[in-house]
Image (cartoon, rainbow, N blue to C red):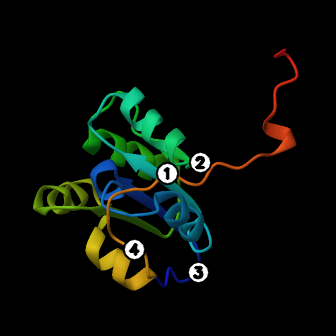
Amino acid sequence: MDGGSGDMTLAFDLDALKELAYPDSVFNDARQWSEYVGVISDQPTYVVTNFTRKHRIRQDFFSGPRGREESLVNVKEQFDTDRHVFVGTDEAAAELAETAGWEYLPVEQAAEAADWELGEPEAPAATTNEDDERDDWP
């Protein structure tokens, strides 16, 4: 996907992330051409947090307990970039993006443009790293 100058804020609807086979790779890739990347959802915060932790996604913002429209408006005000793009899954998401003043991109189009694989999300392979070991365990 060509993000241009990189001066872009990219928001994924949680449902759109759930349609991508490797959401962690998608976020890592998106960071190459986006200034800020995050997740927007109507789901409770713990649902978003559980998904992002399971898939090792480090987000710059998330919707928290707010609704999606309020979240998009707040993110746009907080992250001053040339473009604000919302990746979603349906017409309701497209209307939401327009209402909040964001560009809309269907997840299928985003995946095709960026060469992301659609499918059931797979958790990243577990790694063993000395930094991950806790020294307070017996």
Given the image, on which type of amino acid does mark 1 rest? Ala
Q: Badge 1 local density, few (<14 within 10 Å), some, or many (20+)?
A: some
Q: CA distance from mark 4 to mark 3?
A: 24 Å
Which labelled disc corresponds to residue 117? 4
Given the image, on which type of amino acid does mark 2 rest? Arg
Quarter placement of the C terminus: top right
Sequence-wise, which precedes: disc 4 or disc 3? 3
Q: Badge 3 local density, few (<14 within 10 Å), some, or many (20+)?
A: few
Sequence-wise, which precedes: disc 4 or disc 1? 4
Residue at x-position 46% and y-position 62%: 22
Q: Residue furthest left?
A: 91
SS assignment at label 1:
loop
* In the rendered image, the vertical position of residue 58 relative to residue 136, given as above or below: below
Q: CA distance from mark 1 to mark 3?
A: 31 Å
Q: Decide if residue 92 is on the left or right side of residue 86.
A: left
- The residue under label 3 is 5
Q: Is residue 18 visible?
A: yes
Given the image, on which type of amino acid does mark 3 rest? Ser
**Displayed quadrant of residue 63:** top left
Q: CA distance from mark 3 to mark 2?
A: 22 Å
